[in-house]
Amino acid sequence: MTFLYHGLEARGAVWAEIFAARVPDLPFLRWGQDSVDPAQVRWLAAWNAPAEFIAQFPNLEVLFSVGAGIDQLPLDALPPQVRVVRMVEQGIITGMAEYVAMACLALHRDLPFFITEQRAGRWTYRHTRLAADTRVGVMGLGELGKAALEMLKPLGFPLSGWSRSAHSIEGVECFAGAKGFDAFLAQVGIAVCLLPLTPETRGILCRETFDKMPRGSAVVNAGRGGHLVADDLIVALDSGQLRAAMIDVTVPEPLPEGHPFFSHPAIFLTPHVAAETRHGSAGEVLADNVLRLLAGEPLLGEVDRTRGY
Ligand code: NAP
Ligand code: GLV
């Protein structure tokens, strides 16, 4: 029985050390470095390994995502009995909360506009508002959405949240399900997408959604590129329905040269860096989960494959 890791060499080196200390009896193998007997592989950790790669392990029982999301893995090709586990670790959570706080302050204080004016050599006054005047609405109240809201609280933004099931979070007006979506959108000055990508959420940041937000609102997409309809964003920005957007995830990644997101004055683009898996803390979480597996205990971050997240 072996644990196989497929991914960045530097992360593999850190994880091999952690496993040697925490689960010394379990062989931790690194794809491309160690000799692997495919029939022995029961547990696999990967970011976006292709279906053909995963198909070579007939006895696979658990697939661990190296990241918080799992949509990048070929789940449709995975036998139904294989358990899938996402990464729930503090490095990703804190990184995302920081990114959302930065994005909300930057958009709220019109940074895209002031940067455009600076680059053009213009000293242009524009009235500014305080955080208390802009409601931030977070789509997705999971590990990342809740942490982002906590980071935003002391900044003074009125806060809303939207999720599939009903939540109650102190200081946050919570909405749920398709029924709550329009009321959620009607109030938000900045909508932050931190949803998982599923058939229900694909394309959710589209014209219909933007049109339900107050004119001049802004959008942050740090979920997945597939949440956003890129052409609808450009139309909404050019018409003034949206004021600005901060985009961390795209389709495809990387974006091709000349894509309008690179040059649009109202778009801030970052190359999928909102939250990164931290080698050390993620390795400890993975080792904890393996110890749970060995003890027959529930796993942290196990995905409900019927729900898709
Ligand atoms: P999570 O803990 O699984 O939370 C998901 C949240 O989304 C839950 O609150 C869930 O509602 C809600 N949701 C799911 N489907 C929905 C639907 N159809 N309608 C309304 N709400 C829905 O996930 P997480 O750990 O916070 O991560 C969220 C996503 O962030 C990941 O899947 C990944 O795509 C993305 N991500 C991006 C980066 C980056 O660097 N840009 C880094 C890490 C993760 P319930 O609470 O009712 O279940
Ligand atoms: C990054 O995008 C992740 O899913 O952790």
Image: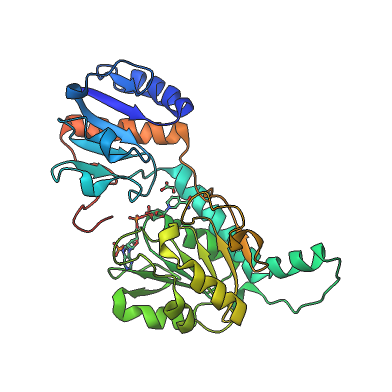
1 in relation to 176, above or below: above
Q: On the image, which quarter does residue 176 sit in?
A: bottom left
Residue at 55% across / 76% down in the picture? 235
Quarter occupied by the N terminus: top left
Quadrant in the picture for residue 18: top left
Task: Please state, as top left, top right, bottom left or bottom right, where the C terminus lies in the image.
Answer: bottom left
Q: Residue 288 in the image: state x and y as whole percent.
A: 30, 33
Measured as percent of width and height from the top left, residue 100 is found at 54, 59
Q: Quadrant of residue 111?
A: bottom right
Q: Is residue 302 visible?
A: no
| Label total for image | 0
Q: Choose between 155 and 301: the one closer to the eye.
A: 301
Relative image position of residue 200 (x, y in whole percent): 29, 67
In the image, residue 273 sits, relative to residue 198, either above or below, namely above
Residue at 21 percent across and 35 percent down: it is 55
Task: Where is residue 177? Give x, y as percent.
Answer: 30, 74
Give above or below for 166 relative to 41: below
Left or right: residue 263 versus residue 83 is right
Q: Is residue 154 visible?
A: yes
Q: How is the image coloured?
A: rainbow
Residue at (15%, 30%) from the top-left corner? 59
- Left or right of residue 130: residue 144: left
Residue 252 higher or lower than 200, as above or below: above
